[in-house]
Image (cartoon, rainbow, N blue to C red):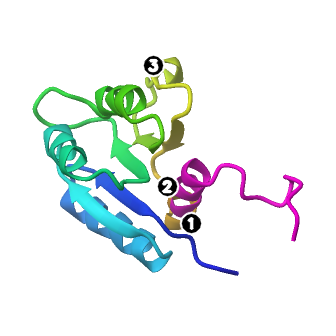
């Protein structure tokens, strides 16, 4: 089985969580970019046109949230997959863009990698009739 490939922007203000997730995604074969806030993420996205997915926490410093980032990415770059995560119970999933995936905290690295794979390659599973 071939490892997945793609470039993932991890947006998380907690450095240890960000590093842990980045390591797991790199181990799964992804190239990882990191940002500690929505503003940093917007800067990265402004410089890079090759990002395949954004993995963002909801709660971020400086007023803008991961939901704000998800909406911006969905409207400006609809080809980018989006995974939004939060430990809060009051997240209304209707606030997320239609194509965004939600992953509740706490999550394990297997679930995080699978969420990214699903938003980058949504039709790469055995249930879809593909020729071998």
Spatial distance from mark 1 to mark 3, Cα to Cα?
A: 26 Å
- Identify which residue is drawn at 14% across, 36% down: 61
Q: Is label 2 in a helix, a strand or a loop?
A: loop
Q: Is residue 29 above or below residue 99?
A: below
The stretch in magenta equals: 113-132
Disc 3/disc 2 C-alpha distance (Å): 21 Å
Residue in view at x 54 percent, y 39 percent? 101
Residue identified by numbered label 3: 95
In the structure shown, which secondary structural element does the residue marked by tag 3 occupy?
helix
Please tell me whether residue 12 is drawn above or below residue 8 in the rendered image.
Answer: above
| 1 and 3 marks in contact (CB < 8 Å) | no
Q: Classify residue 68 by image quadrant.
A: top left
Residue 131 — which label?
none
Q: Quadrant of the N terminus?
A: bottom right
Disc 2 from disc 1: Cα separation = 8 Å
Which residue is labeled 2 in the image?
Answer: 107
Q: Earlier in the sequence, mark 1 or mark 3?
A: 3
> In screen coordinates, is 4 left or right of 52?
right
Residue 33 x/y as whole percent: 27, 62
**Residue found at x 44% / y 44%:** 80
| In-front residue for pair 69/102 | 69
Query: Mark 1, residues whose alpha carbon is within 10 Å: few (<14), some, or many (≥20)?
Result: few
Crowd rating for badge 2 (residues with CA inside 10 Å; few <14, some 14–19, many 20+):
few
Can you tell which mark lies on residue 110? Answer: 1
**What is the quadrant of residue 84 in the picture?**
top left
Q: Is residue 68 magenta?
A: no
């Amino acid at each position: 089985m071939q490892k997945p490939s793609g470039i993932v922007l991890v947006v998380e203000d907690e450095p240890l969580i960000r590093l842990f997730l980045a390591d797991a995604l790199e181990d799964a074969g992804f190239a990882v970019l990191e940002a500690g806030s929505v503003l940093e993420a917007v800067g990265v996205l402004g410089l890079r046109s090759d990002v395949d997915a954004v993995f963002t926490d909801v709660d971020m410093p400086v007023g803008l949230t991961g939901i704000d980032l998800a909406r911006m990415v969905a409207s400006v770059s609809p080809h980018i997959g989006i995974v939004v995560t939060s430990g809060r119970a009051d997240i209304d999933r209707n606030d997320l863009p239609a194509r965004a995936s939600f992953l509740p905290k706490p999550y394990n690295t297997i679930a995080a990698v699978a969420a990214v794979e699903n938003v980058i390659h949504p039709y790469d599973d055995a249930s879809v009739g593909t020729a071998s």
